[in-house]
Image (cartoon, grey):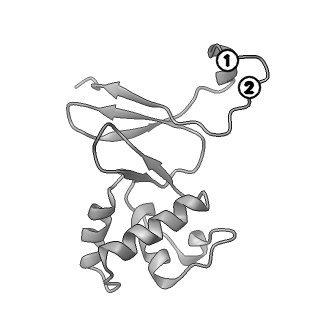
């Protein structure tokens, strides 16, 4: 999927050339890559940068809500370009992480037994299992 510069703007974040390239590489790779995988992808591009720069760019993008971190057990952090509210499914047979959307009309507060007045500020749901062959 080709991503254009106007799609790489993040409100409140100055988009340096390096941030744009890291963001573009992530937007074009929906496989929830690690920072090292993004670094490897960028090594072959015209925009060469250090692994530390990739991490710094990812951190800035996470802080501004443009991307999300996905953590599964003790594996390296992966990054998700989907900023909509959703969960993840970790296929343990392949190691692949898939986005999962919530069914329309379902309100999580209706299925969770939380104390009255609880306010949820963020949501991270990761399911584990295997997908059918």
Horizontal side of 6 relative to 25 (left or right) equals right
Q: Residue 51: horizontal and vertical position, in percent? A: 31, 73
Residue ID at (60%, 57%): 65
Say which mark, if any, is on residue 114: 1
Residue corresponding to mark 2: 118
Q: Quadrant of the N terminus?
A: bottom left
**What is the tally of numbered marks visible in this picture?**
2
Q: Secondary structure at mark 1?
A: loop
- Verify CB contact (< 8 Å) between mark 1 and mark 2: yes
Q: Is residue 130 above or below residue 45?
A: above
Name the quadrant containing residue 50: bottom left
Query: Is label 2 in a helix, a strand or a loop?
Result: loop
Q: Is residue 70 left or right of residue 128?
A: right
Q: Is residue 23 visible?
A: no
Using the image, determine if residue 39 lies above or below residue 100: below
Camera sees residue 90: yes
Question: Percent position (x, y) of residue 42?
Answer: 30, 75
> Residue sitting at 61 percent across and 72 percent down?
9
The picture quadrant where one finds residue 39 is bottom left
- Tell me the crowding category of disc 1: few under 14, some 14 to 19, or many 20 or more residues within 10 angstroms, Cα based: few
Residue at the (57%, 29%) spot, across then down: 102
Name the outermost residue toward the right.
117
- Figure quadrant of the C terminus: top left
Q: Is residue 93 above or below residue 106?
A: below
Query: Residue 41 location, x and y as percent?
Result: 27, 70
- Residue 117 is situated, as x and y percent measured from the top left of the image, at 79, 23
Question: Circle 2: is it few (<14), some (14-19), or many (20+) Cα within 10 Å?
Answer: few
Q: Is residue 103 left or right of residue 49?
A: right
């Amino acid at each position: 999927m080709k991503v254009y510069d106007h799609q790489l703007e993040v409100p409140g974040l100055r988009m340096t050339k390096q941030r744009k390239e890291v963001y573009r590489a992530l937007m074009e790779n929906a496989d929830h890559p690690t920072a090292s995988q993004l670094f490897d992808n960028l090594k072959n591009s015209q925009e060469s940068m250090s692994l530390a720069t990739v991490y710094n760019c990812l951190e800035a993008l996470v802080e501004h809500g443009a991307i999300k971190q996905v953590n599964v057990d003790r594996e390296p952090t992966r990054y998700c370009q989907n900023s909509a509210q959703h969960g993840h499914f970790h296929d343990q047979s392949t190691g692949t992480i898939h986005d999962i959307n919530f069914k329309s009309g379902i309100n999580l507060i209706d299925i969770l037994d939380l104390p009255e007045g609880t306010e949820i500020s963020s949501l991270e749901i990761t399911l584990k299992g295997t997908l059918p062959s």
